[in-house]
Image (cartoon, rainbow, N blue to C red):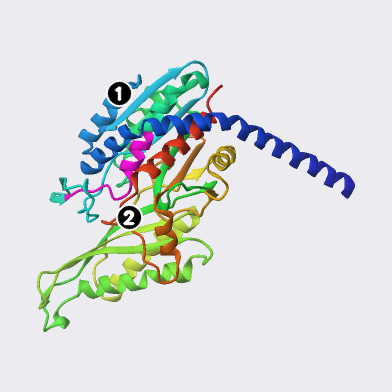
Amino acid sequence: MTFTRIAAAAAVFASLTLSANVAQAQQAAPLKNDVVAKVDAMYPWLDAVYKDLHAHPEIAFQEVRTAGKLAAEMRKLGFTVTEKVGKTGIVAVLKNGAGPTVLVRTDMDGLPMEERTGLPYASRARATSEGRDTFVMHSCGHDIHMTSWLATARTLVELKSQWKGTLVFIGQPAEEIVAGAKAMLDDGLFKRFPKPDYAFALHSWPLAHGTVGFNDGPVSSNSDWLEITFKGRGGHGSAPDKTIDPVAIAARFVVDVQTVVSREKDPKEFGVVTVGSIQGGTVGNIIPDSVQVRGTIRSYSPLVRAKLLEGVRRVAEGSAAMAGAPKPDMLIGGGGQAIVNSTELVNKTEVVFKEAFGADKAKRMPAMTASEDFSLYANEGVPSMFFFTGVYDPKVVAEAEREGGKPIAFNHSPFYAPVPEPSIKTGAQAMTLAVLNVLGK
């Protein structure tokens, strides 16, 4: 084929692709107006739901009140609801004729930490976590997610004449400990209920409200945890030669393990090893018998993941061997697997998002370094899309991006305080349009 013919064929293909995308966007336009109007009209209800959820968070696998509230609201909308799936999860199903089955997930759990936002509806809830009494807070926006999820369900019910198919809305427990998705799947999520043709989830992010971020391919990291106990021989702090000091061994490990990241991993690939807890000893003049080190390992690539896990084990054993100490006790386990968004589904949804929110507010963004167990649904062979919605005043975000500007609170901060109305509305509109875009007409 000549260059001229190749160029002509490429131009025809580009023209057809553009025409298809434009047609798709035009089909979404009237529904966009309907969706916006319906979400606006129901906002007083959403505001009350959000503030109630925010003030009453519950930690992983303790979301009894939260799940009950979501279940009750979904029953009012006409969904068939099953509770206690995966311990505290809920599944709400609505059938509306022949068509695709679409899963929409919200996470439900809060975090064991004290809220310091000063909001009038701030949480003062408490729970028992790992045997200790603790405050609980929705510091990762799961209250925003749940409220947007309910708004999406109600909007789709009010627009039943515009679509055909089956909705499977799930309230998932224990996302923060990366265990809820597995619990629901192990409890027969895709056997007891219709297996979806598509799956969606959203996550609040410290972006300007009104913004929707997304990408195809990996959008979150693999997550592994480490728990290592370095063993020594305790004794008097004035006579370290009579001991084997596990504090020094642990300190050597914490420093040396970073060379696995900086000297063994491909510098172009993402990988992190973080030690977040070192526990050992009681007073300053006693060398303890053991020290426990706990941390997290993050990556995108399976090859990098394997290298980091092997490196952590090797450095831990080497640190102990250099001190003449016994081999450490090591527990290194898998947490979440990276979410890999479907390219076809993202491309299809991107057209609608850009038409609905504008190309300046609906854009591609890099993968986050945090982890999420929504990946397990995709790994069951379900084309999936996980996307992000902003929660902060655009002026505050712009100020934070300036050199020397005031930083904004990130997810898991005690000061994380989304602006409710625009954040919830954007989440609900984006999710409803994404779902409508794949349902039958």
Residue at the image point whose x is 66% and y is 32% from the top: 23
- List the residue tagged with mark 1: 82
Q: Calculate the distance from the C-alpha at mark 1 to the C-alpha at mark 2.
A: 32 Å
Which callout, 1 or 2, points at the residue further toward the start of the chain?
Answer: 1
Foreground mark, 1 or 2, reads: 1
Which sits in the foreground, 210 or 73? 210
Q: Quadrant of the C terminus?
A: top right
Q: Amino acid at mark 1?
A: Thr
**Which disc number belongs to residue 225?**
2
**In the figure, is residue 373 to the left or right of 379?**
left
Query: Neighbour class for label 1 at 10 Å: few (<14), some, many (≥20)?
Result: some
Q: Quadrant of residue 421?
A: top left
Q: How many marks?
A: 2
Query: Neighbour class for label 2 at 10 Å: few (<14), some, many (≥20)?
Result: some
Label 1 with label 2: CB-CB less than 8 Å = no
Which sits in the foreground, 336 or 3? 3
> Magenta part of the protein: which range?
135-149
Query: x%, y% of residue 306?
Result: 45, 56
Does the image show residue 185?
A: no
Query: x%, y% of residue 93?
Result: 38, 22
Q: Quadrant of the N terminus?
A: top right
Query: x%, y% of residue 433?
Result: 50, 33
> Is residue 113 a member of the stretch shown in magenta?
no
Secondary structure of the residue carrying numbered label 1: strand
Q: Amino acid at mark 2?
A: Trp
